[in-house]
Each structure stands twice: as C-alpha cells, then as structure tokens.
C-alpha cells in the first residue's frame, strides 16, 4: 500500500471517544462501534483490564475522568494521532443512594465532579477534533432522573438536571459548526450502576428520620432493577443514531420511563408527589 492509499484509508477511518467504556452502556457502545470499523479510544478507570476491549482498533486508556491533568494528557495523545473525531460518547457517571439532608457534602461534590464537571472538560478537550468533522456527534448519557427527580437519589438527579441544561446550551452554541448534541435518557439499566449506588456506605444512621423510608425505597428500586433495560438495548440506539445524519435533541428510552415523564408533566405537583411516594414507599398517605 502506497503513502497516498494509507492517507486515504486514514481519512476514511471513523473515530470515536468513549468515557465509562469498560462496563455497561459505554462498553456495549465501544464493542458495537469496533464491529463497525471505528477506531475507538476507550476511557475508563480500568480500561486495560477489560478483556472485551482487546481489539486492534481499540486504544484502552486507564483514567479517572475527574483528574483534569490526566485528562489533558490523554487528549494531547489523541490529538497527536487524530485529525478529527466523529463521535464522543460521555457514559462515565455514578449515583449514590441517600437523603439530601444526610449525604456528606464532599460526596455530593464528588458525584458532580464525575457526572458533570469532568464531562464538561471532556467536551472542551474533544471539541477541536469534533469541529474538524462535519455532522460529528456528542452523546451525553443522562437519565429519566435528568427530567424527574428520584426519591433518595436527589444529588444524582441534580447532576443529571445540570447535564440536561448544559447539553441544551451546548447544542445551541455548536449549531454553526455542524456538531450535533444529543441527550440519551434511559430508565433503569442493568449495569454496575445500581451496585455502586446501593452498596456504598449508608450515610443514614439507624436512628435517622429517613431510615424507614429509605429501606422501603431501596427495596422498591432493587425490584425495578431486576426488570431493567439491558445496556445493549441503549447502546444499539446510540450506535444507530451515531450513523444517522440528523438526530433529535433527546431520546427517552423505555415505555415506563415515558409514562413516568407523562405523569410528571400532566399531574399537579402535589398529586404527582403523593403518587410517586405511594408507588415507591407503598404508603397510602403521609402523616
């Protein structure tokens, strides 16, 4: 193969950058894009330990995305190798179950650091590459919790609401550059998310005023996750959209998720709050 042919092949090679790429939706997206012939930069805390990503077109990068200096180093490396990026998938994130009152503020800052501020920096660092490819796309993994706040997942919901507002502003700003921004809003998804959210140290003491309701909510959420969406279903939607020329600003995934949002939008807030508590806590009325 001559130099010209190599350059032509390089120019036709599609490139994707994915955070949270070693598990769940991020991993499934990486595997599907690799199957489609994309060069994939897989960013995750344990990317090199993920055997599934051992692929000739995949560059695995171990990184905590909230580490700003490490992130800049990673993108210096990517910029040295690539002239453009076709797709950025921001899948890194986690939640912690707990009451708004009792969750330590340091834990709240940590959640926002990973779920929101790190994502903002990834976008800033990747945008020069995305602008070099017409109709490139940014997919930000939000949640139904970005539209409707969840009981005892208040800070996670807040971080996703922030992501929704940020993505809307980003979409408006990037329109002249033909960079599309899309929010993916699934309901519960089978992944490591729920294991992290519900297995971390419980911040409420046994004497907490919230202890009884938290136990009831935890039991409810555990049942919900047993019937949750498969990560592959969400990834298939993202990969399909990545290959579409025109995409919408947001996609709500899951019928129950769509029903919940519809109720939230239609019902008066007091009715919705009572109904949500009734479903989650199995309590007919509050004292």
Image (cartoon, helix red, strand yellow):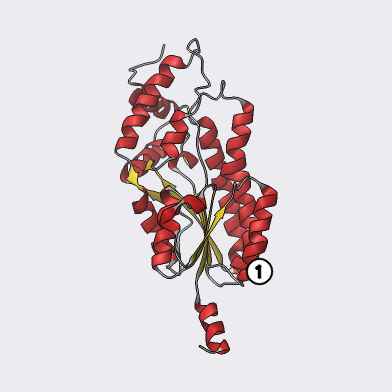
The residue nearer to you, when weighing 269 against 76, is 76
Q: Is residue 98 above or below residue 254?
A: above
Residue farthest left in this picture = 227
For residue 141, side relative to residue 229 (left or right): right
Q: Quadrant of the C terminus?
A: top left
Is residue 222 visible in the rendered image? The answer is yes
Give the class, few, some or many, for how many residues have Cα within 10 Å of label 1's Cα (few <14, many ≥20): few
Residue at image position (43%, 64%) is: 33
* Residue placed furthest toward the right: 69
Q: Is 258 or 58 nearer to us in this picture? A: 58
* Residue 114 x, y percent position in the rendering: 58, 42
Point 46% across, 35% down: residue = 196
In the image, is residue 113 above or below residue 15? above
- Element type at mark 1: helix
Q: In which quarter of the image is residue 235?
A: bottom left
Compared across the picture, whether 34 is left or right of 130 comes to left
The answer to whether residue 150 is seen in the rendering is no
The residue at which mark 1 appears reads as 80
Image position, residue 113 (x, y; %): 62, 41
The x and y percentages for residue 231 are: 37, 49
Q: Where on the picture, by quarter, is residue 161? A: top right
- What residue is drawn where x is 45% and y is 44%? 143
On the rendered structure, is 142 left or right of 282?
right
**214 shown above or below 174:** above
Which picture quadrant has residue 192?
top left
Q: In the rendered picture of this protein, how many numbered marks are placed on residues?
A: 1
Residue 220 position in % (x across, y down): 34, 27
């Amino acid at each position: 193969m001559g130099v010209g042919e190599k350059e032509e092949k390089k120019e036709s090679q599609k490139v994707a950058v994915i955070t949270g790429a070693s598990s769940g939706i991020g991993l499934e997206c990486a595997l599907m894009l690799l199957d489609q012939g994309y060069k994939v930069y897989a960013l995750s805390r344990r990317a090199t330990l993920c055997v599934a990503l051992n692929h000739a077109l995949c560059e695995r990068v171990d990184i905590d995305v909230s580490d700003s200096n490490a992130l800049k180093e990673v993108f210096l490396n990517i910029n040295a190798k690539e002239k453009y990026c076709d797709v950025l998938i921001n899948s890194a994130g986690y939640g912690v179950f707990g009451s708004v009152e009792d969750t330590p503020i340091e834990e709240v800052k940590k959640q926002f650091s990973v779920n929101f501020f790190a994502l903002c920096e990834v976008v800033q660092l990747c945008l020069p590459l995305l602008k070099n490819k017409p109709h490139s796309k940014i997919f930000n993994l939000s949640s139904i919790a970005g539209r409707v706040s969840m009981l005892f997942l208040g800070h996670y919901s807040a971080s996703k609401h922030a992501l929704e507002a940020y993505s809307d502003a980003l979409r408006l700003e990037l329109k002249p550059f033909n960079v599309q921004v899309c929010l993916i809003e699934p309901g519960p998804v089978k992944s490591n998310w729920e294991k992290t959210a519900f297995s971390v140290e419980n911040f409420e003491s046994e004497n907490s005023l919230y202890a009884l309701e938290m136990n009831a909510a935890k039991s409810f959420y555990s049942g919900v996750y047993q019937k949750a969406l498969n990560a592959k279903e969400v990834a298939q939607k993202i990969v399909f959209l990545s290959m579409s020329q025109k995409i919408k600003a947001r996609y709500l995934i899951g019928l129950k998720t769509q029903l919940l949002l519809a109720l939230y939008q239609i019902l008066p807030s007091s009715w919705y709050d009572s109904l949500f508590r009734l479903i989650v806590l199995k309590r007919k009325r509050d004292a």
